Image (cartoon, rainbow, N blue to C red):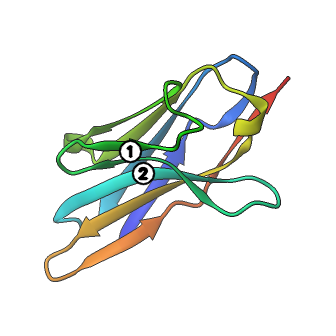
Amino acid sequence: QVQLVESGGGSVQAGGSLRLSCAASGSIFSIRAMGWYRQAPGKQRELVADILSGGMTNYADSVKGRFTISRDNAKNTVYLQMNSLKPEDTAVYYCNTIVTGIIRTSEYWGQGTQVTVSS
């Protein structure tokens, strides 16, 4: 089993910055991908950014140029640096990982961390 521990959420004013962290632990042979999703009230959960094992990154168009995803492979930790935050970025942010164990590949989710951006 894999556990994801998220941190870094909070409340900021528009234009401010936050840095989210997510550390994975447990039965991990390798991490195929890690990413961040978010869900705002009344909306479906959506991909914000992810990073693959080879380092390739993907961003939602709405955050491109403002957010940066990175990973520390030695620590099994993914980060999301969020700059120039906007009120529409307000959501619960969920860490996601796809990990390969000894015999199978599985997907896991964190419990979410609230990000609130005020105007």
Residue at the far bottom in the pictured view: 103
Asked whether residue 1 is in view, the answer is no
| Callout 1: SS | strand
Residue lying at the far right of the rendered structure: 119
Residue lying at 70% horizontally and 37% vertically, measured from the top left:
89
**Amino acid found under the numbered disc labelled 1:** Asn
Pointer 2 residue: 35
Disc on the earlier residue, 2 or 1:
2
Look at the image and tell me in which quarter the C terminus lies. top right
| Residue 58, numbered circle | 1
From the top left corner, tell me how far across and down residue 43 is, in percent.
75, 60
Which quarter of the rendering shows the N terminus? bottom left
Q: Nearer the viewer, residue 62 or 87?
A: 62
Q: Residues within 10 Å of mark 2 (few under 14, many from 20)?
A: many
Q: Which label number is shown at residue 14?
A: none
Q: Is residue 36 above or below residue 80?
A: below
Asked if labels 1 and 2 touch by Cβ distance under 8 angstroms, the answer is yes
The residue located at (21%, 43%) in the rendering is 73
Q: Nearer the viewer, mark 2 or mark 1?
A: 1
Q: Pinpoint residue 32: horizontal percent, then vertical percent.
A: 24, 60
Q: For the residue carrying disc 1, how many other residues have a C-alpha within 10 Å: few (<14), some (14-19), or many (20+)?
A: some
Residue 70 to residue 14: above or below = below
Please tell me which residue lies in front, 110 or 118. Answer: 118
Q: Is residue 108 above or below residue 22?
A: below
